[in-house]
Amino acid sequence: MDFITILRALWRGRLLVVLATLLAVFAGLEMAYRVTPGLPPKLESRQYNVALGTVNVLVDTPDSQVIDLNPTGADAVSTRASLLASLISTSPIKNAIATRVGVPADRLVVLGPQAGATAAPASATKTAVAADGRRANIISIRTDATLPVISIDTQAPSAQEATRLADGAAAGLQDYLSTVVKTQKVPHARRLVLRQLGTPEVGISVRGPRKALGVAVGVFLLLVLCALIVLLPAIARALRAAAAEERAQAERQQRDRDADDGVVAALKSEDQPAGSRTFTSIETPGRVRAVDAGSASLPETAAEQRG
């Protein structure tokens, strides 16, 4: 099918092309924007920016194991780091963090490391993000089995909020430990010490489908619909032509069979004896002549001779 034929087919179905264009534009907009019905409709981009922060907290001994070669209790620090990381999503620590960062506890998502894993599962993070979308406040905890370090990852709508979440999570852990120390009256030499390693590192991440994806979806859908507009009538015409050809071929075969039957009948009649031939009277304008099946004329009758 050449280009001119395609253009002619599209012109014949120009109303369908208009409908296909509208459908493709709507699909592209729906992919890239949230469309709110109205006059005019409100478009909100599905693409948004979120701030991602991270900070590390060292679970240390009173005599810092960073400089002390043989600090008391250093052998149990890694286990305590994993324990604290697992407890961070529970109500006491989560409430302490929420108080620090000024976010309601029910709007703060804290994901602790799962059993046998070093980070919160991706499915849990996706569920948490889907709950609030671009306005989500998420704290995700990671640990290292070989190091007494708790890594705190945060997500927030802005860089300032992501930083505040990271600092607040570290401070909330310290508040929780201080509360436990006062309640249990743990001696100073046996207390865990949390040391925040530097300030949070914050970056911006782009989430959601890009606008180029909406354009690509719209163009692809329009091409598919135009191809259907061109091909479906051509296929229908081809099917009708094939059916007509089959009928014509069947009729030709029937005529050929009828002709063959006539030839066979003629041959059979020639093989019959002369006395058994059948004759057919054919009326002519001035006389009646008897003709046998082989078109052989007979002598004129007496009536013709008298005439």
Image (cartoon, rainbow, N blue to C red):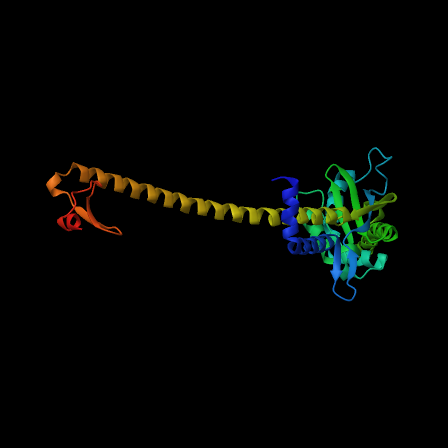
Residue 274 seen in the figure? yes
> x%, y% of residue 97?
81, 56
- For the N terminus, the quadrant is top right
Q: Is residue 267 above or below residue 40?
A: above
Q: Compare residues 253 and 70 and report the one nearer the observer.
A: 253
Residue 93 seen in the figure? no
Q: Compare residues 111 and 40 and report the one nearer the observer.
A: 40
Q: How many marks?
A: 0
> x%, y% of residue 44?
79, 58
Q: Residue furthest left?
A: 275
Question: What residue do we see at 37% from left, 43% from top?
Answer: 252
Q: Is residue 100 above or below residue 140?
A: below
Quadrant of residue 250 in the image?
top left
Q: Is residue 168 above or below residue 275?
A: below
> x%, y% of residue 229?
61, 50
Question: What residue do we see at 77% from left, 49% from top?
Answer: 211
Q: Compare residues 211 and 246 and report the one nearer the observer.
A: 246
Question: What residue do we see at 83% from left, 52% from top?
Answer: 165
